[in-house]
Image (tube, grey):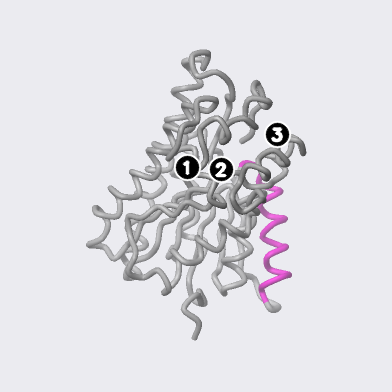
Amino acid sequence: MSMFDLNGKVAVVTGATKGIGLGIAQALAAQGAKLVVGSRDGAVCEALAADLDRDYGKGGKIARGLAFDLDSLAQVESFASDAVKAWGGVDILVCNAAILPYIGPSAQTPPELFDRILTRNIHHNFRLCQAVRASMAARGGGSIVLIGSEAGRNTAPMVLAYAVAKAGISHMALCLADEMAGDGIRVNCVAPGLIRSAASTDTLGEAGFVAAAKAAPLGRVGEPQDIAGAVIYFSSAAGSHVTGETIIVDGGGGRLSPRSRVSYLEDASGKTYN
């Protein structure tokens, strides 16, 4: 049996209907996991579940879609409860949903958006992790993967509040790993660099991708599948002795100077993606 085999496992992925989340959901399904996919649009979640059934279900149902909004703590907690019930338990949780409602000079960050960015990206994901803990423990343990960002490990003044939140996500993985180890739950973080998706394309434009690719040591921006591979590692037997760690998946971009790393964001000032 492959070290990456996930047959018999139930995985929950938030922000699953596009970009990084979609790539992660598809990769988990390809490795044999059953899925609960969550996002703000219930119809889109259900359509994705149907696509996963068709592409990976081998004639059976393997995915269920549940709507929730990361902005609402009540919806986060309700989503967690429904996700546990969907397949009778949870083995893998991927906290991918995030918000980035402001790009621009840090001093001009509206106070209400600064608070919203930290609360939704850190606190609400923390509550989601806690909400599935009992189910994972009852099944003998599990894996929680938090999606951070390269911005949380390097200078990112154009997205300062978001960068601080993502730094908090990485440290939260370390703290929860220690707290949940007794339940057999591993907690890790994947920190992407720039990843090509519909949202990031709308925000940066093709010129932004070209500039970022030229600056990256590997000569390209990332794809959702690049992040999915790290998630599969953390979720499977291959990563069974790893907890509290953050893997940066950015094509080596973290070694660049702050000027090079953020230049493409300056042209996106005033735009947002969520």
Q: Amino acid at mark 3?
A: Leu
Q: In the picture provided, is 104 more to the left or to the right than 10?
A: right
The residue labelled by disc 2 is 68
Could you say which is closer to the camera, residue 157 or residue 132?
157
- Are the residues tagged 3 and 2 within 8 Å (C-beta)? no
- Are the residues tagged 1 and 3 within 8 Å (C-beta)? no
The residue labelled by disc 1 is 76
Highlighted range, magenta: 40-57
Q: Amino acid at mark 2?
A: Phe
Bin the neighbour count of mark 2 within 10 Å (Cα to Cα): few under 14, some 14-19, many 20 and up.
Answer: many
Q: How far across and down, in percent of the image, does residue 174 sit? A: 31, 50
Q: Of callouts 1 and 2, which one flags the residue occurring earlier in the amino acid sequence?
A: 2
Q: Is residue 123 above or below residue 189?
A: above
Q: How far across and down, in percent of the image, does residue 259 sit? A: 55, 30
The residue labelled by disc 3 is 204
Could you give the CA–CA distance between mark 1 and mark 3, rounded to whole angstroms? 29 Å
Residue appearing at x 63%, y 25% in the figure: 266
Which quadrant of the view contains residue 253? top right
Q: Of callouts 1 and 3, which one flags the residue occurring earlier in the amino acid sequence?
A: 1
Q: Of callouts 3 and 2, which one flags the residue occurring earlier in the amino acid sequence?
A: 2
SS at circle 2: loop
- Are the residues tagged 1 and 2 within 8 Å (C-beta)? yes
Q: Amino acid at mark 1?
A: Val
